[in-house]
């Protein structure tokens, strides 16, 4: 069965056990030196994508020598941990992971801490301003201006009637990602500027949780990942921003302003095994998976 959030494969060398524990330990150490494990850490948005690609890759090849005959006969072991874009880049800086997963740009202060940084753009995402289909705003207009979004998310508008007299006197429920995450940083930079979101905004632990909260509450509004919102497109209304719809074309040409890169970050040069899996992510199979999961492929 595929495990999309952590992929751990352990193995026992039974023939070596027959000849003694020391042979088994030497073989395990040899495989470890050859780098038969790949570790990813970071963005929860990217975690499900990478884990899905890794699951398919492992099921297809099972051992590294089936990928390339020059690779060791060791089970494919790809670990994917989700902890946010900030954690992803920190683990690369600390050298506790191989690839950091980011759903935002790398900050200059972060880049300076990595002697030889490699950035791989594997897809594009955007943040869509989403409401429940039963939200009274949906029947009034199909979009918001940047100024209106700021007033809603900052708490200047506390009820929908504050926004428009024809709307009900019901509290606006603002749903955001965690303040320290990459998604919120993108939203803050592209929409809020120097204005903070309201202090009582509900912070969702993942994009999936954010979307579910919007679906469950007719008075909710939140910024949902383009990829995740596409997976729930029948249960959400995605609003235009400054008259521009969150479409693939508008995201690609830059006219839709709340967009973000999906990046893998590496320190140094990937070895042959790491490069072989990176080629899959950037190749036809991986890019198709990225598209199937609602994001925009780069190839």
Image (cartoon, helix red, strand yellow):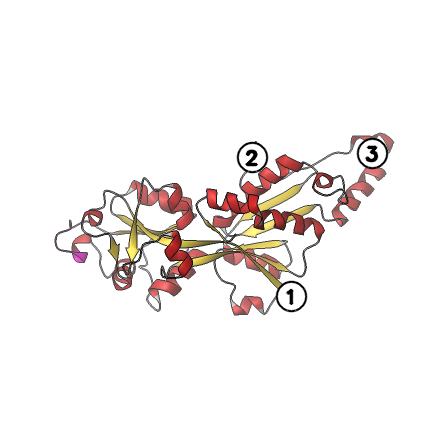
Structural distance between the alpha carbons of marks 1 and 3 = 40 Å
Sequence-wise, which precedes: disc 1 or disc 3? 3
Q: Nearer the viewer, residue 99 or 276?
A: 276
Alpha-carbon neighbours of circle 3 within 10 Å: few (<14), some, or many (≥20)? Answer: some
Q: Secondary structure at mark 2?
A: loop
Residue 55, by quadrant, is top right
Q: Is residue 48 visible?
A: no
Q: Nearer the viewer, residue 218 or 55?
A: 55
- 296 in relation to 110, above or below: above
Q: Which residues are magenta?
A: 162-170
| Residue appearing at x 75%, y 48% in the figure | 34
Q: Which residue is mark 3?
A: 16
Sequence-wise, which precedes: disc 3 or disc 2? 2
Residue 249, by quadrant, is bottom left
| Residue appearing at x 40%, y 41% in the figure | 231
2 and 1 marks in contact (CB < 8 Å): no
Q: Which residue is mark 2?
A: 2
Sequence-wise, which precedes: disc 2 or disc 1? 2
- 273 in relation to 154, above or below: above
Q: Residue furthest left?
A: 166
Q: Is residue 123 visible?
A: yes
Q: Secondary structure at mark 1?
A: loop
Q: Is residue 109 magenta?
A: no
């Amino acid at each position: 069965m595929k495990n999309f959030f952590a992929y751990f494969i352990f193995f026992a060398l039974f023939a070596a056990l027959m000849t003694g524990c020391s042979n088994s330990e030497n073989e395990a150490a040899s495989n470890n030196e050859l780098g038969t494990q790949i570790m990813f850490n970071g963005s929860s948005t990217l975690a499900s994508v990478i884990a899905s690609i890794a699951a398919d890759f492992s099921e297809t090849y099972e051992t590294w020598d089936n990928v390339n005959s020059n690779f060791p006969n060791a089970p494919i072991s790809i670990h994917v941990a989700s902890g946010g874009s900030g954690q992803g880049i920190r683990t690369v800086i600390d050298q506790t992971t191989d690839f950091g997963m980011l759903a935002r740009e790398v900050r200059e202060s972060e880049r300076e801490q990595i002697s030889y940084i490699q950035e791989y753009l594997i897809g594009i995402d955007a943040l869509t301003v989403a409401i429940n289909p039963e939200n009274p705003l949906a029947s009034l207009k199909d979009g918001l201006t940047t100024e209106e979004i700021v007033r809603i998310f900052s708490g200047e508008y506390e009820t929908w009637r504050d926004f428009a007299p024809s709307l009900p006197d019901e509290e606006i429920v603002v749903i955001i990602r965690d303040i320290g995450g990459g998604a919120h940083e993108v939203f803050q930079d592209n929409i809020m500027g120097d204005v903070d979101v309201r202090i009582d905004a509900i912070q969702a632990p993942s994009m999936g949780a954010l979307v579910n909260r919007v679906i469950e509450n007719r008075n909710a509004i939140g910024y949902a990942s383009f990829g995740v919102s596409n997976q729930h497109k029948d249960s959400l209304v995605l609003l235009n921003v400054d008259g521009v719809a969150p479409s693939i074309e508008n995201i690609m040409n830059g006219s839709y302003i709340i967009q973000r890169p999906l990046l893998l970050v590496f320190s140094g040069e990937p070895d042959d095994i790491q490069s072989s899996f990176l080629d899959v992510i950037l190749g036809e199979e991986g890019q198709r998976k990225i598209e199937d999961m609602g994001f925009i492929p780069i190839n």
